[in-house]
Amino acid sequence: MKVYDVPEIRNVGVIGHGAAGKTSLVSALLYCAGTVNRFGKVESGTSVTDYDDEEIQRKFSITPALCFCDWKKQKINFIDTPGYGAFIPSAKAALRVADAAVVVVCGVAGVEVQTEKAWSFADEFRLPRVLFINKLDRERSSHDRALESIQARFGRSAVPLQLPLGSEKGFRGVINLLDNQAYTWTLDESGKYETGPVPPDQAEEARSAREKLTEMVAESDEALMTKFFEAGELSQEDLVKGLRSAVREGKVFPVLCGAALLNVGSQLLLDVILDLLPSPAERGEVSGKDPRTQSEVKRKPVPSEPYSAFVFRTIADPFSGRISLFRVYSGTIASDTSVYNVTRGTAERFGHISLMQGKELLPVPEVKAGDIAAIAKLKETHTGDTLADKAHPVVYDRVVFPEPSISFAIEPKSRGDEDKISSALARLSEEDPTLKVSRDPRTHELLISGTGEQHVEVAVSKMKKKFGVEAILHPPKVPYLETIKTKAEAQGRHKKQTGGHGQFGDCKIRMEPLPRGAGFEFVDDIFGGAIPQNFRPAVEKGIQESRMRGYLAGFPVVDFRVVLTDGSYHTVDSSEIAFKIAGSLAFKKAMEQARPTILEPIMNVEVETPEEFMGDIMGDLNSRRGRVQGMDSQGTTQVIKAQVPMSEMLSYSSTLKSITGGRGSYHMELSHYEEAPAPIQTRIIAEHKPGLAAEEEEA
């Protein structure tokens, strides 16, 4: 494979809402560039970038995929990103290593929820971008309506560079405003087209659109503005040069159009990517931190600098092992060399470096600054790590992903897979940083958490297909607790005669409530030898075991103190087990008098929502026994802060999606425990008492 120099490379993230046609567009671009000899289709499972079994089956992108083409002797790296809400956070990691973005907008639906989310990611990384209105051959498609939605959401700096020739089934090509030419395609997916003059019936529309484009370009630069005022127009040279500069500075966002499935508009988009979007050299130096001093350091995107690279994605492959995708920011990295992982302070051995064409790995001798490549079987390197020259270390910022919004308890379908499931989940969470795996210390359940129900379901399905482990999902248990509300005294007496040595243990205790969060205390308040010193820890052990089994509904009892006040023993029949049983009996008797109650976990919840849904969101939180604590404004987005019982939030993800049309998001964390209302306690006890009785019988 050819090794490209920095000015010959473009790194482009393809972003937008799900089903806007991103993968189809990438397929068309690869086909037009001659990279593939077959026009891959999502519907038939033959696209280059939707190669995972889950993607082929579901017919949409789940993870970012890398591919590239050679167009006019320059290399374009495409990162095809997911567009549905549960998977779009991974698009953020892809844009971290891109230098520009192509934003695909559906010509029927216009700008949708995740288009805005993806746009915000591009804003965060200050990426130049162009927009592509797709599917203009579909029924009910409208270029004007789609453009209106684009300008309503992203401003007037999103300006047409092309106009459509025809509409819906009559769509056949585009008018390019830069050269005032009409491009008409043969609608057989071949990508063949003819160039001619603008049709007379669209000449006035094209003239007006070119004027608006010229005005936007002139506004982006004072010198051009002066020329524009003096001459009333810009020369072709000034217009092209000014547009290139304005796009790269993020002041103008050209809007192109086409139909990916008909292969209409592909070549012009490839030209625009080369002509208007920046190479890594034009994006300039990148900033990181020196891990030794924490001071800022910069790296220039030139092959002669010390090497540095950022790992932005890990693929868990059951055959090749771990495949790390990385972008080289400076220097040159060759195959079969040693590199240094600055993040983890360890050396790694590089084998054969490869370029990724979807799932295909194409070996390359080296990669230079600005390029993106893959390496298999690194032992210690994970997503977000920086590789750099040990003598010139630098660490690049990791991508911050949103917290998971939904959790499920997960268990293997067959008991023999208990070890396998942990290993498989660890591999999947390496591949997907938005997937979290943990064990709840209170319920002892293995939890899998993700950005949505579909996200978790896909992970479980991948686990079965990739690693042969089947699992069952169910809602997680709410980690309720129990406590007491008043003091109580009780005696526990265990006496049993069995023919030989008997069993005898007798203790008296006092139980007292403690402040919330205090846990459990045991106080030995016996004076003298009512109970020998060596038996007193057994009393505590009996109480500890009983309190962990609970009293009302099987949940641990907390926030109380037990004072051992008195007791008696037998010189022959007393033993540790006898006093352990006595302590357990005393605990149960004291609980009868101490007004036990159930505590429920209360979560701090932050909901981000467009302003128009605020009333519905607050009403829904109130219906969940939530208490709104305050609101903050972030542009047109409102952040509602509330405290809500955890039990009321288990199904919140789907409700929020329904209320906001997928435009809202939330995260939550444990705040504190408080007493559950009486009707809730009655329900909890009814649900859990049978299980508690069964456990007591087993014990």
Image: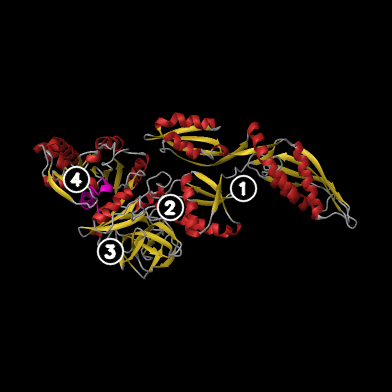
Q: Position of residue 473 (x, y in %)?
A: 55, 48
Q: Are marks 4 and 1 in contact (CB under 8 Å)?
A: no
* Nearer to us: label 3 or label 4: 4
Circle 2 residues within 10 Å: few <14, some 14–19, many ≥20:
some
Q: Give, as a three-letter code, the residue at label 1.
A: Thr
Single out the residue that lies furthest toward the bottom.
Answer: 336
Q: Marks 3 and 1: which is nearer the front?
A: 1
- First-in-chain label (2 vs 1): 2
Instruction: Find disc 3 in the rendering and name its residue.
Output: 303
Left or right? Give the position of 353 relative to 319.
Answer: left
Q: Quadrant of residue 306?
A: bottom left
Q: Within 10 Å of the Cα at label 3, are there few (<14), some (14-19), or many (20+) other Cα atoms?
A: some
Residue type (three-letter) at the residue carrying disc 3: Pro
First in sequence: mark 3 vs mark 4: 4
Residue that numbered label 4 is attached to: 243
Is label 2 in a helix, a strand or a loop?
Answer: helix
Disc 1, SS: loop
424 displayed left or right of 327:
right
Mark 1 crowd level (few <14, some 14–19, many ≥20, 10 Å Cα): some
Quote the CA–CA distance across marks 2 and 1.
32 Å
Q: CA distance from mark 2 to mark 3?
A: 38 Å
